[in-house]
Image (tube, rainbow, N blue to C red):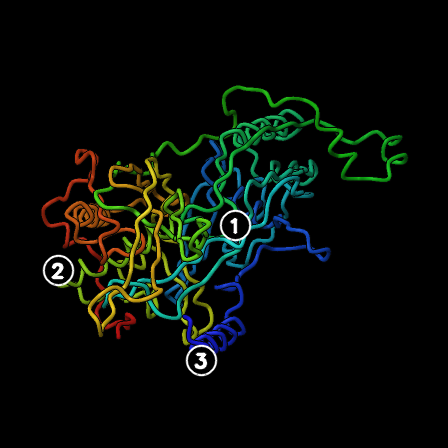
Amino acid sequence: MGDPVGADILDRISRVLSEKHPDEVAVDIPVAQDPFDQPIVRGTSIFGALRAHLADYRLLAARELRFRSISSTEPVARTTKRQATLADLLCGSDPEEIDGTGARMLRPSALRLVSSQLTAGEVSDGMARTAISRERGAAEPNKLFRRGQLLGATIEVLLQIDLAILDAVLSEWGTAAVTTGPTAARQVIDDLSRALGAWKPFIGGQTCVGSGRCQIAGITLRWADPLPIQQLLSSSDTLGLLRSATRQPVPVGELQLSTRSQGERWSIDVPLKCVDPLLVSPVASSDGTHDNLATTLDIVPGSSWRGLFRARAEYILRSCGVAEVCESSVGTCGRCATCELFGWVPRPTDPAGRAGAQGLIRFSDSVVEGSPITLSHAPIDRFTGGAADAKFFKRKAWAPGAQLTMVVEQTPGRPPVPAWARALLSLVLRDIDAGLIGLGNSTTRGYGTLKVADHGVLPAIPAGWLGGVPRVEGAEVGQR
């Protein structure tokens, strides 16, 4: 580094790289902002998650609804039927709902999201992520990306129910259990309040890899129809007036007009122990002496788990003779077994109308508990055979013995996780336990080997599980 010519070359290379890639990796999808550059959480994101939650509450007595269901992979629509839910009663007609003549149903929403105000939160550029090469088992070149994140967010949501619309829907659906009038509306609102209390929402993007998990901090409501005319005339802030009207605590009791689906969602918590040092998404830092120090994160992002599991699942299925499995680092087809299990997005060359789909499972972030360790490294000079000059660097990682828990669960609103998928996930976990694949960075250099601490939690692998894997004969599956 003492050579002035070499220093000049390095300086020019550094300037070129900084011009092409400022701040290491640019944020390709930032956090949504309002016209004043303040972060926001869009009401559509919250209302969509709420509607999906209310769809779990089936009305005890209501007519069947008809739908023209359109698959994201098939152009032919199918007519289906199901019983009405709280979502159908309160949130308007489903886009696929049809009437008796086959025309699209247009039923207004009685439930309205008036505002979603972000009262606390910190904008972050997020962690740099990349794809895994299916050939080398290492990071794919030119695939680094970032997603903006909102950390520690507190959101105040204001909901309003139009009683006239609600009463009209109740009149149309009136039966012995669903009647009209103030009593029926009160019962609907009570059921909504209890459903809100049981809601565990996931808001925003990347919810299948540990992002967007929220909890309800509190709910207030008030039966005010109409609001006093004096308050309406004297107030200059309509939202403030509506907020001030919500004082009464939500009552606790049983559901009256609906019942929640009792089917348990599949999930598995696998305790793991580090055999080697664990280096996860290292961040450049300085120890006061050397600037080339990279420090591990204290969590394993859900995206790291999903990438690891999907890459290995593709390998296992191909090794078992299932050739109809797409290579997701090239593109996803939306038809094969791994696309069904892990989700998929349309490729740029796909025809319009292919919107993609969430996977059947989602992964949560894993908190690492243990002691850090700093390891020193120096590359080998290919000419002298000794340590390369001025190339010393350090890695601050989790020491062997650190513990973490991998959590994977069924995605709400998606079909149950089939037996073949559970067996496939179990095989991936067994490969992790055997040391065939590692987690995090530098897995080919002595980092990232894990052991399953409790083999009793691993899903069983039934005989003939491979026969249940969906096959796509003659379909384009995105292989090289």
Q: Residue 272 appears at what percent x and percent y?
A: 25, 39
Give the camera-side residue of 186 and 294: 294
- Vertical placement of 436 versus 226: above or below? below
Residue type pointed to by label 3: Val
Crowd class of label 2 (few under 14; some 14 to 19; many from 20; radius 10 Å): few
Residue type of the residue flagged with mark 2: Cys
Numbered mark located on residue 5 in the image: 3
128 left or right of 372? right
- Residue 320, labelled with which disc? 2
The residue lying toward the viewer, choosing from 93 and 394, is 394
Q: Position of residue 251 (x, y in %)?
A: 59, 20
Mark 3 or mark 2, which is nearer to you? 3
Determine the residue located farthest toward the front in the rendered image.
2
Query: Local crowd at mark 1 within 10 Å, few (<14), some, or many (≥20)?
Result: some
Residue occupying the point 26% across, 49% down: 448
Q: Residues under labels 1 and 2: Cα distance?
A: 36 Å
At label 3, counting other C-alpha atoms closer than 10 Å, the crowd grade (few under 14, some 14-19, many 20 or more) is few
Q: Secondary structure at mark 3?
A: helix
Q: Tell me how far mark 3 sits from mark 2, CA to CA.
A: 56 Å
Give the residue type that dot 1 points to.
Gly
Residue 84 seen in this snapshot: no
Task: Specify which label sits upstream in the sequence, 3 or 2.
Answer: 3
Labelled disc at residue 175: none
x and y percentages locating residue 70 in the rendered image: 43, 60
Instruction: Name the secondary structure under disc 1.
Output: loop
Q: Which residue is mark 1?
A: 204
